[in-house]
Amino acid sequence: MSFDAVLFDPVTGTSPRVKAQVFGSSLEILRPGADALRVDASRATLSAGGWDKGALQITWTTTEGAWALSITDPRAADELKRLPAFAASLQEAQQAQRGARRSGRLGVTIVALVTLLPLLAVIAVLVFRDPIIDFVLKRIPLSVDAEVGRMFEGSVTQSAETLKDTEATRAVQRMVDRLSADSPHPGFEFRVRVQKSADVNAFAAPGGLIVVYTGLLKEAGSPEEVAGVLAHEMAHATNRHSMRQLIYAGGVLRLAGLLIGQPDAAAMFQNFGQLSELKFSRTQEEDADLTGFDTLVRARISPQGMARFFDRLQNQGPNPPSFLSTHPASADRAAAIRRKTDGLKDFVAEPLGIDWPAVQASLR
């Protein structure tokens, strides 16, 4: 049975394709346009050849020079076994080929893994994002929250849009003081800043800074409605939702310094965007609702204010104010607050004692 091969001819310096077969104790090579060439197997050497040892190579020397036959045809091994002179070397060559194939597969696997490693790392971060953030957040002390809050407070206080000491700032501070009077979170020192803006919005920085826009105060129908918003935002801070979102926005790997005690940890958050633009998940919003509800009840402030404020914003048509775009409220959430309020026993709300029309008049 013949097999295909490539012959290197030292006489012509060419490498034509040829047919080869065993002829007695010799190897007969059929060359196109030339006489058949017979090679005494005992005077030739067989080995694994090629860069990947994927070929069988037979070499021999004559007076014309060094000849070589390169074979990749899988039929060749069975034919060459018929030559006793090649038996041992053929077995060694086949073992070398098997080893090379194993090494080649391992090499390809390693190259593929190295090439895909960045993609795999990104996928791993996306898949395990929440556990990674939980791991990081648990190891960041509350003192870092306070440091981040102070950093943002400095930029807010320096803004020309921040009201200094007005009827509105005093009213909002009174609400926050009452809400935080019996707080189970002593690590948070809540401070209020009111900024001039038409946006109906409020947000809480890590550590206890609360920023309220005048647009929200003008929109609210009572101090209880504003207190409901404040309780909700304070819950984002105490439950560390804001810090969690900053970690996500900044990238988990960039926060490694927090875990090794970097002293200026808060500075890592400077370019992570505005706190007012943080987007919280539905779960975090519901969590803030429940925690805020408990805060209102503990402060003897009617939780109905929170529900009424959500209703007020929800009924403003197809283009809700920014508070709803960053804090997605819904009729279902307002209804849930009312159900919890209806389930309260022996609860008596105490008025905030704030002249709300006077507060709103001061904003004009």
Image: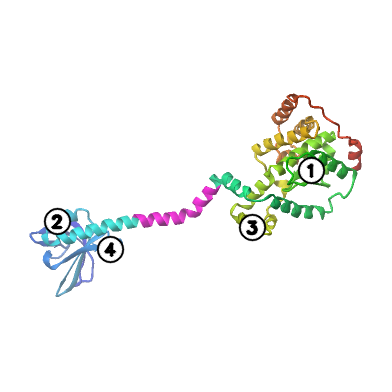
Mark 1 or mark 3, which has the lower sequence index?
A: 1
Q: Position of residue 323 (x, y in %)?
A: 75, 40
Label 1 sits on what residue type? Answer: Asp
Q: Position of residue 202 (x, y in %)?
A: 77, 43
Where residue 289 sits, quadrant-wise, is: top right
* Secondary structure of the residue carrying numbered label 2: loop
The residue tagged 2 is 81
Rendered residue at 61%/50% (across/down): 136
Label 2 sits on what residue type? Answer: Lys
Q: Nearer the viewer, residue 267 or 51?
A: 267
Q: Nearer the viewer, residue 233 or 49?
A: 233
Q: Nearer the viewer, residue 161 or 253?
A: 253
> Image check: 23 left or right of 128?
left
Q: Which residues are magenta?
A: 105-125
The residue tagged 3 is 261
The residue tagged 4 is 50
